[in-house]
Image (cartoon, helix red, strand yellow):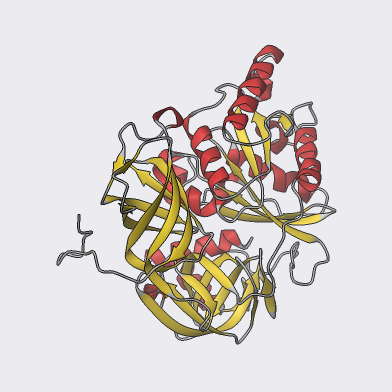
Amino acid sequence: MLLYGFRITPKEIIRLKYNCQFHRQSLNRFSLFSSTFQHNLEQLFPTQVFLNYSTDSKKHVNVGTIGHVDHGKTTLTAAITKVLQKKGLAKYTSYDEIDRAPEEKARGITINAAHIGYSTTKRSYAHTDCPGHADYIKNMISGVSQMDGAILVVAATDGQMPQTREHLLLAKQVGITKIIVYVNKADLVDDEVLQLVELEIRELLEDFGFDGSNLPVIFGSALEALEEKDTEYGVPSVLKLLDILDSYIPDPERDFNSPFMLPIDNVFTVPGRGTVIVGTIHRGTIRKNAESELLGFDTKLKTTISDIQVFKKSIPQAKAGENIGALVRGIKVKDVSKGMILCAAGSQKISNRFKASIYFLSKGEGGRSKPVTNKYCQQLFSKTWNVACRIDMDANVDMILPGEHGTVYVTLLRKMVMVPGQQFTIRENNITVGTGIIAETLTDINITTSLGKLEI
């Protein structure tokens, strides 16, 4: 039988379902891929395929929902799929299917970024539902780094909140320029409150460098849309959002010709087949049987891509911008980590040191109140990885004040794939304190102690 595009037996499905002869971690990873690629473990026959990027003439765009916890991001994502299912353009994905992990269900919040596929009459979309809770911001960074545009969800009952600001900061930092605002729970407040919320959000977006005066703002109720209510704030608000998605977010420019590179977002094992790597192709074109390398966290592994899946369909190749599952030969799941890079053989190298231009946020922007000095050690986030780092000043600079730019030399605790122009974020005590761009990679140096920690 073919499940998720990979051939497995009914016996293996039963073993997965009842967790026989498999670790719970493997089952969770399999379930993640199941949800990501629009399948259910108990669904024995494939459903209609709505996305086939490499053969579909429609443009493919990566979007997602960002915003504060409990403002309705996941409800809106579920509502979009339900509305589009009526048009034959998506498979309905329920709230519970999106927030699939046991801890997510228990806490009622999104923890891992979830990927959902759907189409409009004009485009095909891969939609990332990002976690809003501050405890899971690193998963949000990984999710937003894959987007071409974002839907900012703001509850009319709350207005802007701490993660509203932080998500906008991170979206700006990774290069997102187009934001659509969906003011949720509009049915619970009066028109005067809605006007105040819109004014406040537009001002906030201007503060972060977005076109707050002109970008689209939609008032709606994701819950009413999910309940298929044809009220002002119900289904019509989601249809309006989809129309604006098609028109407001431009077709992304993709690099299909460079050697392929895919930042790994997840990895798991398919019984009887092998290890599957999940992520969005950053550049290039991946083909079956391509000689490849897995790089990152001081690791270099050679492999071959045996199969490629795009939303439950096996395809011979996939291009930049597509979210795929790649079956890799001769690789064990324990040898691969989120944040590593799958790339064309010989096209990339790993390093632990680079020169960068950096900006440290002022206290008013949510950053530090004290200056940054030499040998400043914190966690660095870039693409889908995060690693401890040490930041050193230029030779003639003693410190960088909050609210100022500077040139720094960054050394990572582990060797990673880095390229000039790559953006990164520095976080301290669960807040974003700095954003930067890699200028050039430098010769590796060892700054670890005998215990494997950063030397300060």
In the rendering, at what x and y percent does residue 57 appear?
83, 66
Q: Is residue 68 visible?
A: no
Q: Is residue 114 above or below residue 335?
A: above
Q: Is 239 situated left or right of 80 in this image? A: right
Q: Is 306 situated left or right of 27 in this image? A: right
Placement of the C terminus among the 4 image quadrants: bottom left
Q: Nearer the viewer, residue 247 or 3?
A: 247
Q: Residue furthest left?
A: 450
**How many numbered marks appear?**
0
Q: Is residue 344 visible?
A: yes
Q: Residue at x 63, y 79 (%)?
A: 1
In the rendering, at what x and y percent does residue 321 appear?
66, 63
Q: Nearer the viewer, residue 280 or 209?
A: 209
Q: Is 71 situated left or right of 188 in this image? A: left
In the rendering, at what x and y percent does residue 65 appear?
61, 43
State the image quarter where residue 19 is shown.
bottom left
Q: Is residue 180 above or below residue 339?
A: above
State the image quarter where residue 429 is shown.
top left
In the rendering, at what x and y percent does residue 59 appear?
78, 60
Q: Is residue 4 above or below residue 456?
A: below
Q: Residue at x 81, y 61 (%)?
A: 58
Q: Residue furthest front?
A: 396
Q: Is 283 situated left or right of 365 in this image? A: right
Q: Residue at x 74, y 31 (%)?
A: 214
